[in-house]
Amino acid sequence: MSKEKLILINQLCTHYQVEMSLFSELNEFGIIEILTIEDSYFIHEDKISVVEKVVRMQKDLKINLEGVDTVLNLLDKIDDLQTQLNTLQNRLRLYED
Amino acid sequence: MVFIDYYKILGIEKKATQADIKKAYRKLARKYHPDINPNDKNSEKKFKEINEANEVLGNPENRKKFDKYGEDWKHADEFDKAQQQNQQSRKDSQGQSSRNFSESEYSDFFESMFGGRSTRGGSVKFKGQDFHAELHLDLKDVYETHKRTLTVNGKNIRLTIPAGVINGQIIRIKGHGGEGLNGGPKGDLILKFSIANHTNFKRDKDNLYATADIDLFKALLGGEITIDTFNGKVKLKVKPETQSGTKVKLKGKGFPVYKKDGEFGDLYITYNVALPTKLSEKEIELFNELAKLRSK
């Protein structure tokens, strides 16, 4: 597998000053997917923003991982609902004068 | 400058304990944190205020100064020093300080908490703040892919706006937001499209809807009419005995499909049969004859 868009978890641990266990837990929660290549652990660069969100929520709001996972799921739902609302609002315009 | 009452911001009383402040801050931060409220400018503003209030009231020394000097608490040391000098110089110092404490210092203060000077979070690198902007376009503007230059925070950004963008759609432009913290990457620019429609077409995603008037005789006998599509006129055959309200679909004459070059939605035309008015005596006579024929 190409390592082009993968980021070494050890580097992220240093960068965000977090333990490796955080990434293992995020993997267990299904928030990220850890990829193993030649005994090294990676995540895809697309997942960086979600990792940052988790770190901020933990540091700023003291939310534990169960809470973070719930928040992320609810945010996804809000995002879906927002898209649906937008589509419906645009459709409603069809019936407005 | 409007006085900012940090107690009011945190919803606590002046006699609140440090534990009360911490509790109030945590509760409000959970409610207004930008990660919990994406794309919500009001929450972002509120979160900044809450953080500022916590930074001041959560620190007993700063809190004491705030309680004593109110909005000028940051100049407390200057005041105390001035008080030791003569009455006149104290007055001058107070006046000067008050004038200097401007709106811009309010945000500087916020930066001091979250920016490079911050001690909060040590050397942890974080991505910069996301900037939010709204781009107002006309429906005609988004019929074709075009380039546009936006000015965001004094910087020009050249953007390609793909044809078929939908009203309310949000796109994220990487690296055009605020500076990262402690050397972290820049934030993103989150752009929301607001598309006004000043045309006679109504749009639902990629499909367009319009009405076309046809006269009674074309509706009854059939014929050819010319109608407007979004990008020009087309000729259309009307079938004999077409009813008012009949819909016809013009395949591929709708709006471009977002990010799918060459693909278009459909145009739906609803016929509106326009009845003749101001009939002549002869016409009334002939219509009467027709009516008699129909009733036989």
Image: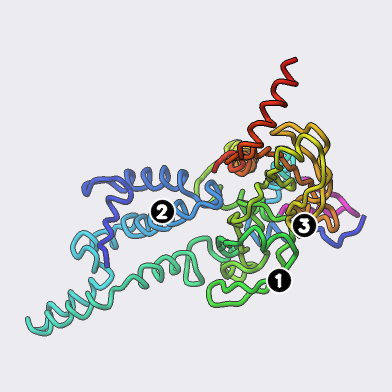
Same chain for labels 2 and 3? Say yes or no: yes
Relative to the observer, which residue lies in front, B187 or B235? B235
Which chain is home to disc 3? B
Which chain is home to disc 1? B
For the N terminus of chain B, the image quarter is bottom left
Contact? badges 2 and 1 (CB < 8 Å): no
Task: Please give left or right for residue B249 compared with residue A13 in the image.
Answer: right
The disc label shown at residue B46, or none? 2
Residue B98, horizontal then vertical, whole percent: 22, 74
Q: Separation of disc 1 and disc 3 at Cα?
A: 27 Å
Name the residue at 76% across, 59% down.
Answer: B232
Three-letter amino acid code of the residue under disc 3: Lys
**Callout 1 secondary element:** strand
* Among numbered discs 2 and 1, the one appearing first in the sequence: 2
**Callout 3 secondary element:** strand
For the C terminus of chain B, the image quarter is top right
Residue B116, horizontal then vertical, whole percent: 51, 71
Q: Nearer the viewer, mark 2 or mark 1?
A: 1
